Amino acid sequence: MIDPSCLAQVLAETRVLLDEAAVRGGRAPGAVELVIAGKYLPAEDVPALVEAGVDVIGENRLQDLLAKEAVAAGRLTFDFIGHIQRRKVRDLLPRVRLIHSLDSLRLAEEIAARSEGPTRVLVEVNVAEEPTKGGIVPPQLRAFVDEVSARTDLVIGGLMAMPPSHSDAEMSRPHFAAVRRLADDLAREWDGRHDFRDLSMGTSQDFLVAAEEGATKVRVGRGLLERVQKTTQGLL
């Protein structure tokens, strides 16, 4: 079980680091939201998460979301950050604030068909065009937005990306910068239809670089929990 006081300490330290990174990138403190990656946390940790002040959990699987939702009883907000099977959209939509991982026109149509009114989503971008990853590659992004706009009433609220994994966080910087430029261009082109104000990018190894480059949401899990464990051990 997670120690809630140690988690609260690490969350506070992480939010300070995010604020400092946002300022380095020319934005105000509070510009970056911390989304806790839920795949590293069992449902039995939910009470500790709530006590520690966790606001948003990002889940990769519907069954994990359902398990945590049952324990949270309305005390946590859930985003969905993983690949979505179309047959699960109906059960997923009422339970999440935001889907970060729109990656196909068929999924867009399914979300629109199951939604009550326009739903805001993020498009997953395969920024480095890696063949093993999902998402829309940058050369196809404009055409994808055109198709989604023509065939659904979804509102594209921004982009989500995960650069190639690397031990050096600086290796992610050009990818984050490229995603920011894509979002800026699309925001101008689609002003009034889509907003493109959110960038979901940055995980445990590179979230501070992502914050410097314009992320509005970072998805942190494993690295944060490792810091909690070290803090807990230091108190023993």
Image (spheres, rainbow, N blue to C red):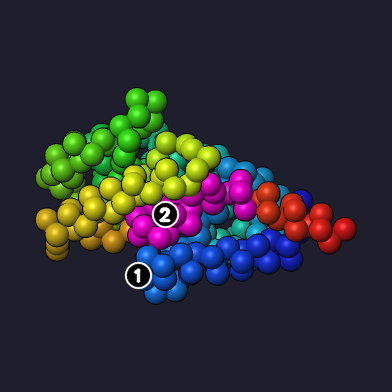
Mark 1 surroundings within 10 Å by alpha-carbon count, few (fewer than 14), some (14 through 19), many (20 or more): few
User: Where in the figure is residue 167, as x and y percent of width and height?
Assistant: 53, 40
Q: Position of residue 41 (x, y in %)?
A: 64, 47
Name the residue: 23% across, 50% down: 182
Badge 2 amino acid: Ala
Q: Can residue 27 be seen in the rendering of this structure?
A: yes
For residue 116, say whether it is visible. Answer: no
Q: Position of residue 141 (x, y in %)?
A: 20, 41
Q: State the residue lying farthest toward the bottom.
A: 28
Q: Quadrant of the C terminus?
A: bottom right
Taking the spot 61% from the left edge, 46% from the top edge, the residue there is: 222
Instruction: Indicate yes or no whether the magenta region holds residue 217.
Output: yes
- Tell me what residue is drawn at x 75 percent, y 58 percent: 231
Residue at the spot x=45%, y=40% of the render?
A: 82
Task: Report the disc number at residue 210.
Answer: 2
Q: Position of residue 62 (x, y in %)?
A: 50, 41
Front residue of 41 and 43: 41
Position of 86 relative to 37 (above/below): above
Instruction: Using residue 105 as the reference point, say whether residue 90 is left or right of it.
Output: right
The magenta stretch spans which residues? 199-224
Q: Considering only order in the chain, which callout, 2 or 1, is on the residue closer to the N terminus?
A: 1
Could you say which quadrant of the image residue 108 lies in?
top left
State the mark number for residue 26. 1
